[in-house]
Image (cartoon, grey):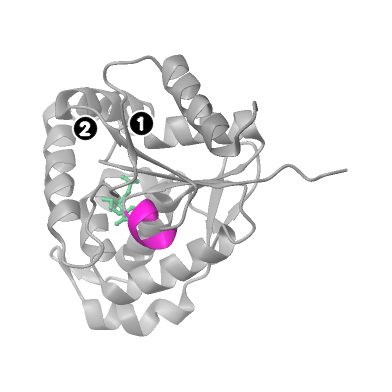
Amino acid sequence: MVQAKKITIAIDGYASSGKSTLGKDLAKALGYIFIDSGAMYRGVALFALEQGLLDSGNLNVSELVAKLPEISLYFTMDATQVLMLNGRDVSLEIRSSKVSEVVSAVAAVREVREKLVDLQRAMGSEGGVVMDGRDIGTVVFPKAELKLFVTADLDTRSQRRFEEMQKNQPSSTFQEVKNNLSQRDSYDTQRSISPLSKAEDAILIDTGSISREEQLKVALELVETVLGHEV
Ligand code: DC
């Protein structure tokens, strides 16, 4: 039997733009692995917080770099993706507002990015992967067969993240969530190493203007075009 070709799909975009929702839906429809690379940066940020490397908000970069070899990160491939940090399930903790506040600073450290990009490439080495993040189409998988760039306006994204956070952290206000997203947007687009940017060959999807089902339909049609057959 001829093995169906499995491609690599890169999804980049702003915080809470709906990348992960589309990525998960797409991976499920295709029987691919989904990897949320932002969760990995959040895992390192949680480690830095727990090690006391963020004294009064300032990241101790040299200490973090020295401790990077102590960090083991992997996903269990259950139905709901679980991130393990040094053998411990941190899937919920990495979504806290404390982690959201410091993660962009951690993600701006060159050595952190090098370590995580290596891990991400290893996870996607076999193809059949949908990975979302900020630099997947530009740096991690510049040769990905399909690249999507997902956007939505700041208010739409803030409302989404706010509703999501009501489940675990009902004390956060809409304005706090919006401020954090807008701060992260500028940090992520302006950092010197691998800033968030749309790859030239990425296709734009505005998740604010079409439904979840329509987004999946559009993405699946793009996959079919790349593969040259129906999926
Ligand atoms: O997708 P997210 O909001 O959970 O990502 C958390 C942070 O990690 C985000 O502010 C920027 C950083 N990040 C990154 O720099 N590169 C990636 N590929 C993914 C996330």
* Residue at the image position 12 percent from the left and 49 percent from the top: 186
Residue 223: % across, % down: 53, 34
Residue 173 falls in which quadrant of the image? top left
Confirm whether the magenta stretch covers residue 138: yes
Camera-nearest residue between 184 and 86 = 184
What main secondary structure does the magenta stretch of the protein show?
helix
Kind of residue at disc 2 = Ser
> Disc 1 residue type?
Gly
Give the side of residue 217 with respect to residue 229, left or right.
left
Residue 18: mark in rendering: 1
Q: Please provide the residue range marked out in magenta.
A: 135-141
Quadrant of the drawing holding the N terminus:
top right
Mark 1 secondary-structure assignment:
loop
The spot of residue 218 in percent (x, y) is 45, 23
Residue sitting nearer the eye, 32 or 184: 32
Provide residue 216's location: percent of width, then percent of height: 48, 23
Q: Is residue 29 magenta?
A: no
- The location of residue 210, given as percent across then percent down, is 33, 15
Identify the residue position indicated by label 2 in the image. Answer: 172
Residue 150 shown left or right of residue 68 in the figure:
left
Would residue 58 appear left or right of 160 to someone viewing this image?
Answer: left
